[in-house]
Structures are given as structure tokens and as C-alpha cells.
Amino acid sequence: MQYSEIMVRYGELSTKGKNRQAFIGRLNGNVTKALHEFPALRMHPKRDRLHIDLNGEDAEAVMARLSKVFGIQSFSPSVAVAKEMPAVHAAVRDLMAATVPNGASYKVQTKRSDHDFELDTNEMNLNLGDMLTDARPDLVVKMKNPDYVLRVEVRREAIFLSTNTVLGAGGLPVGTAGKGVLMLSGGIDSPVAGYLALKRGVDIEMVHFFSPPYTSQQALAKAKQLTTKLAPYVGAIKFIQVPFTEIQETIKANLPEGYLMTIQRRLMLRLAEAIAQKRGALAIFNGESVGQVASQTLESMVAINDVTTMPIIRPVATMDKNEIIRVAEDIDTYALSIMPFEDCCTIFAPPAPKTKPNMDRARYYESKLDVDGLMQRALEGITITEVRSSDDYMNENMALITELL
Ligand code: ATP
Ligand code: MG
């Protein structure tokens, strides 16, 4: 089937009053970025729809990319036809032949933005219905819940026909909710948290702590590879790697075992906050889930959260592990997440971390460290790369991961 455009219906943004223009502008920008591999496309953002003129590009490939862009409720590949009824009839017959199987039920639904057209919406519905009764006697007309809806849009420039509506990714256009940093480990939870943050329109940058030589190059590459899985939702994501070795060694050498993890987490959070401030991010996102492990009891969160007043958003906080895994499978991060590379936390994890650390004791132990000096050196060692969704990047990085497996 030779489609001429993809007609995109906006998601939640249609209810956002005066911000509407900003939302549409951002969505249009995000769609353009997501579809950069299709140079012939032409975008026509309108008040209630975005029309993507295919201009010869492949509809299936374009739709596969489009399905990852947040802020889209649904989209339909459409055929454009001249505003003359014989041409419309021929095009409807072709489209129905290609997309609606024998015996299916259907109805015709016309919308008109060109009110000068010779037929009004009712007349158009009846006209096409009559024509199809003759041309496709196998089909059944059904007004309630038909298998197919033939959508007809009478616009100024042409008449557009579609029979197929594909569900979009939902959510809000990335960037409309501001910027945040995501604390990304190599585990299952934090990539899911990142996906959910993106879905609500937050533009995230990844912050990853690594501890060479205790953690391997592969562990780092794995975190980057997880980032490539989220990049298609935005086009590209900044990956900020923060050296954490000195901090972990210092904590391990100087503080009691029961508080190693609490203090490590406090330092991670302090660094995340400093990075967020420097990069204009307003909140910190992480993959903590209440009660999942020792560092994620409410008592632990109190003792760790103590170091910052910046909002910490935990998108998976109340999800069961099974629910988190289901999302991880959907977004294709699960298989990567369960690859066995030591995380900086597993290596320095004490055999019995406190499940109920005390905030005052945490403050006291932390005060024995040169927190400012440790943080300054970690921040000086930061490397920032831009992770794209391109296949080349993913393949190269994956080769690094699998090299030593
Ligand atoms: P996951 O690692 O998938 O997030 P987890 O159950 O292993 O889940 P923890 O290791 O307890 O979680 O870490 C809790 C959260 O702390 C992570 O979700 C992540 O946001 C953050 N975190 C842990 N390790 C790192 C790291 N090396 N770099 C950045 N953030 C980290
Ligand atoms: Mg982890």
C-alpha cells in the first residue's frame, strides 16, 4: 500500500490550555529527531494533529520509530486523494482491498475541515457506504465496535483515508517537564525508572558511578548499552560517568561495616545533586523500590535522603519486582540488566548492611571524612559522552561487553 502521510493524534497535551503551542513545538521537534533517518519526510504540525508527509519514505519503518515517541496517543497511515468523488471511490476500494479482509465489519467515519466541499459528513458516509455495499458485498456494516473504521478527512488540500489506527507510546513529549538526572546502575530497576521519567516528559541525563579496577570495563559498557535502549525515546542521552573508587576505598578503610552502604549512598546522592545543579536539572531520579533491599527500607531512605533537599523521584518505588521486570522486558533492557558484571555496590557491600540505619550516626560517621575533598576529586574525574540510538554505536559497545564473556 502506498501511503502518503502518517496522521498523528496528540496525547495528553491536548488538555494543556495555553501551553499547547509549546507542547506541539516540542513534540514536533522530538518527532523530527526520532525520524532523522528519513530525510524526505515533511512535518506539518497543526493545532490538533501532526501530519507527517511521507514523501516516498517507507510507512512501516517510520511508524516503528514513531511508536517510541512520547506524547502521541495514536497514529494512522493515510492515503491522500484528490477531492473528486470518482478518485475517492477508487482510492477507498484500493485501501479496503489492501487492509480489510473478507467478511470483516466496518463503518465509515467522515470529518470535515473544508466546509465548502460538495458533500457534508453524513452525505459522505452514506455515499461511501453505498459504494462499498456494491464493491465489497462480503463486508458487514456495523456502527458499534466494528472491526475496522474507514476514516475520511476532508481537508483543504486533499481527502485523506485510513483504516488503521496504531496506539502511540502515550505520556508527555520529552522535555516538556524539564530536566532531571537518573542514577543509572547496571541493574533492572534504574533503566525502568529512566523510561518512566522520560514517559512523563522529563529529559534525563544518566549519572553512573564506577569503581575501577574493582568494576570492569564491561560493567561500564553495560550501563552505556542500557542507555542506548532508552536513547530511541529521545534521540540521544548524555551519559555521565563518575569515578567512585577513592570514595569507596576511603569509606571501607575508615568506617564501621554496618554503615558502609549508607554512607556510600549518601555520597552518591551528594554527587548526583552537585551534577544536577551544574547541569540545570531540577530533580534526581533513581530505581529504588520500597523494601526491596537493605538500602531501600524507609529508615534507610531517611538516613540517605538527609543529604539533599532536591526532589528525589523514585518511579518504581511502589512496584513489585515482577512488575518492574515486565516493563524491563517491554523496553528490552532486561536481558542486558541480568548480565553478570559486578556493580560498584556489590563489591563493597558489607555482608550485613544495617536495614535500620540511624540518621544521626550516619551524619556522625560521614563527618569523619573529608567529604568536600572526596567530592571535588570525583567531580573532576567525570567524563560525559553522548549516547545515540544508532546501530553502529550499539554494536561497537556490545562487542566490548561480550568480548570477555
Ligand atoms: P538497580 O541496580 O536495577 O537499580 P537494585 O535493586 O540493584 O536495582 P541498588 O543497587 O540497591 O538497586 O541501587 C538502588 C538505586 O541506586 C539504583 O536503582 C540506582 O538508581 C542507584 N545506583 C546504585 N548503584 C549505582 C551506580 N553504580 N551508579 C548510579 N546509580 C546507582
Ligand atoms: Mg543495582
Image (cartoon, helix red, strand yellow):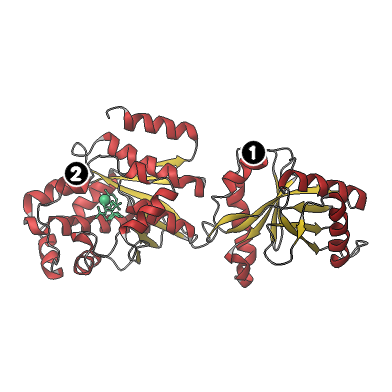
Name the kind of residue labelled 1 in the image.
Phe
Left or right: 8 with respect to 383? right
State the quadrant of the C terminus: top left
Image point 11% across, 52% down: which residue?
Answer: 350
Lateral position of residue 276 relative to residue 65, left or right: left
Element type where label 1 sits in the image = loop
Q: Label 1, on which residue?
A: 38
- Viewer-nearest of labels 1 and 2? 1
| Residue 145 in view (yes/no) | yes
Quarter of the rendering containing residue 113: bottom right
**Looking at the picture, which amino acid does disc 2 mark?**
Thr
Mark 1 to mark 2 CA distance (whole Å): 44 Å
- 27 up-or-down from 217: above or below: below
Q: Is residue 97 left or right of residue 352?
A: right
Which residue lies at the image location 24% right of the left edge and 50% below the top edge?
376
Question: Farthest residue toward the top?
Answer: 403
- Taking depth in this image into account, of 278 and 262 the one nearest to the observer is 262
